[in-house]
Amino acid sequence: MKHLLILLCIFPLLSFSQNDLLDEIDQESPEDNYATATFKGLKIVNFESTKLTAKKEFTFVVAHRFGSLESGLNTFFGLDDAVTRLNFIYGLSENINISVSRSSFQKIYEAALKYRLIKQKEGGSLFTIVGYHSLLVNTAYDKANLPKLEFKNRLGYTTQVLIARKMSKNLSLELAPTFFQDNLVLDPNQDNAQYALGIGSRYKLGKRWSLNADYGWHLNRSSTSPFKNPLSIGIDLETGGHVFQMHFTNSQAMNTNGYLGQATGDWSDGDIYFGFNLSRVF
């Protein structure tokens, strides 16, 4: 089953085309030969992509995850259990972004730095490489239930290296070696320091549409952990200044520590969440 899920991330099977006013964005520059439009969204689905917000631009992202579809009409197919994440990203330069966000999942506040190290170029680098680091504060922990709780226990950290290649006009792939730490984990058998490998893909279906997928392989999850590896599949729709991402995922959490360390859904049981990311550039 695991091998099938990984293949779903890497080899999208559906293709169609349609005309669009955004042709120019997808074209390679004849002047510098750098790869462009490897990914259109700042996220593939859950994983960060190698795309950055441009210099002096501000991007606002609203991400939403409904509750599990498995609950059916009891929660109106997850509508009653939705969580939201608001993310504010600013381009300090063409190669450096800073961001702050707030998620209703565990009332998490997060600050992040994202920067490009290398850009794929014909006759040059084979890959685009981007670094990503974040610091989060979980404000949902209740000292009444955790009397020894200190502020440092609320903190979590993430470091990722995003390695992407635009394989062809239609297909882009990404690997994301990831280290993350939660200073407090409730499973006594789970290490605070955790490691994962992310795999992501984008397959262009038309000028406005693409099929996106990502999968996170947790490398040192406790054998007693109830959590799952996150698998997410969705569609990107470009509409002028917006990128609208619609998807299904087995993780309701949207920050890196959450979807890699605390995904609860199971695709084989239909325990999945519908969600979307909507970004607007200013």
Image (cartoon, rainbow, N blue to C red):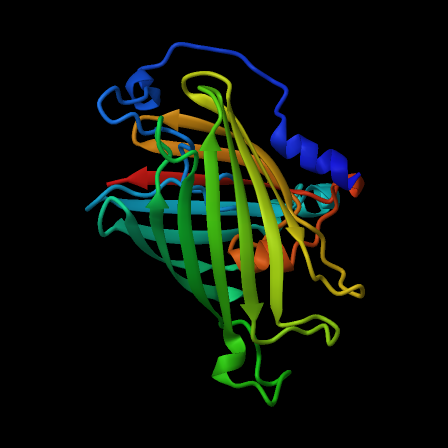
Q: Toward the viewer: 127 or 40?
A: 127
Q: Toward the viewer: 61 or 6?
A: 6
Q: Is residue 133 left or right of residue 180?
A: left
Q: Quadrant of the C terminus?
A: top left
Image: 280 above or below 216: above
Q: Is residue 74 left or right of residue 143?
A: right
Q: How many marks?
A: 0
| Image location (x, y in percent) of residue 6 | 68, 37
- Is residue 46 shown to the viewer in this render? no
Report the residue that reaches farthest toward the front: 123
Image: 182 above or below 75: below
Q: Toward the viewer: 223 or 87?
A: 223
Report the residue that reaches farthest toward the left: 56
| Image location (x, y in percent) of residue 48 | 46, 46
- Quarter of the rendering containing residue 14: top right
Q: What residue is at 60 percent from the left and 85 percent from the top?
A: 144
| Image location (x, y in percent) of residue 235 | 53, 29
Q: What residue is at 41 percent from the left and 31 percent from the top?
A: 38
Q: What residue is at 35 percent from the left and 43 percent from the top?
A: 118
Q: Quadrant of the N terminus?
A: top right
Q: Toward the viewer: 207 or 264?
A: 207
- Is residue 37 shown to the viewer in this render? yes
| Image location (x, y in percent) of residue 154 | 52, 76
Q: What residue is at 41 percent from the left and 44 percent from the top?
A: 129
- Quarter of the rendering containing residue 257: bottom right
Q: Is residue 30 left or right of residue 77?
A: left
